[in-house]
Amino acid sequence: MPEFLKLLPAKEAMERLLSHLPQPSPPIEFIPTADALGRVTARPIISPENLPPFSRSTVDGFAVKASSTHGASDTLPVYLTLIGEVSMGTAPQFSIRLGEAALIYTGGMLPEGADAVVMLENTQIVRQSSQGGQFGELEVLHAVASGENLIQVGEDVQAGEVVLPAGVRLRPAEIGALLALGILEVPVARFPQVGILSSGDEVVPPEVHPAVGQVRDVNSYSLRALIQRHGGKSTLYGVLPDRPMVLRETLAHALAECDLVVITAGSSASARDLTASVIQEMGEPGVLVHGIQIRPGKPTILAVCNGKAVVGLPGNPVSALVIAGLFVAPLVDRLQGVLLGVPQSGVPARLATNISSLAGREDWIPVRLVPDQKGGFLAEPIFFKSNLIFNLARADGLVCIPADATGLDVNETVQVMLLAEF
């Protein structure tokens, strides 16, 4: 049996856990691209065609041979023959020769022979033909270079190119890009299944009015929401009493059905020891970490049982959710093939007050973001107790005080990890 509550730094704890897990190989399913927001690509996506499939203008103006405009300026304009207009959505039925120009709109297909577009504001029609406004003589007041104000065939994507590797979580930009290529289905990782067990003799379901000394189950539902945000599906195994046999049977059931299991234990040391002891019986190598140099969340348990991760969280709601964001969320991502190690996005802000900390312990402090007079943000710390969930609900994000620091100073610039992206 490992020596429990021997504290490890958070990074080392995660590395130890990952070193005992097999490489993920998520099952694949094909779904409509339009419905794939938030899903993770399970295979590289290869472009079936060039994008754009034709050279097109990026401005409203006139399609020309660039050499026809050389030397043009406000004081010495160049005059070109206006021979027509490019209709949107169709291929031009004419070509451009030296000394000629054609009216073209943003997105219009470049006529054969043209290699640049002069912006509309750098021209004026000085003589109109009796054939109509798209014919006549054009005065060009600004020279253009070959390739200016247009997009070439395949400049965005070329046929056969890998446009998205495996392991990418699809955002609105990727959805639009894939549909622009006519990719109507996308291979994605199946939703990982996460089992959630809550334990504690004092814990009752949310719909039950707690008696004196009881509390409602907060953790199961905040954890389920966090897991859902990261693309996982949860099975709630209910609130379990602090009895070894019940926890043992339920955990065995959850491990058989799920890819990852999360347990929130009661607040007492005896409840945490019970959880660790039962996890240790569930498979090799068992408990790898019991105690992390972090606040909130010191009594965290990280284990692997026959190839599946088991995470034991503190019972206090703030501690449980913070630790879940730091450990459970990356594991859910990993089960979908998302590569770990990508830096968390954050918002820079100036600290509104001093924050003290103990050297050797990583602290995560909830903060509220307030606009400052310089157009940025102030981070106002919310000094909290780990069993008060609304302290976290009132926060916009978390600030990390590294283990090698004794605090942060007022006006120091910090990165705020947004809870909206947790």
Image (cartoon, rainbow, N blue to C red):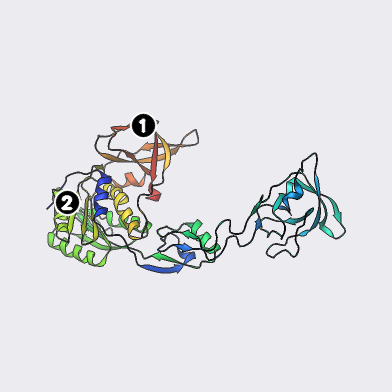
Q: Which amino acid type corresponds to the residue marked 1 in the rendered image? A: Thr
Label 2, label 1: how far apart the Cα atoms are? 35 Å
Q: Give the labeled residue for mark 1.
A: 353
Residue at the (14%, 60%) spot, across then down: 281
- The one nearer the camera, 293 or 81, is 81
Q: How many marks?
A: 2
> Where residue 215 appears, x then y in whole percent?
23, 52
Say above or below: 28 vs 341.
below
> Label 2: which residue?
272
At x 55% / y 62%, what residue is drawn?
180
Q: Depth check: 53 or 385 in front?
A: 53
Which quadrant of the view contains residue 198?
bottom left
Left or right, 157 with reference to 190? right
Q: Amino acid at mark 2?
A: Arg
Q: Nearer the viewer, residue 38 or 287?
A: 287
Mark 2 neighbour class, 10 Å CA radius: few under 14, some 14 to 19, many 20 or more: many
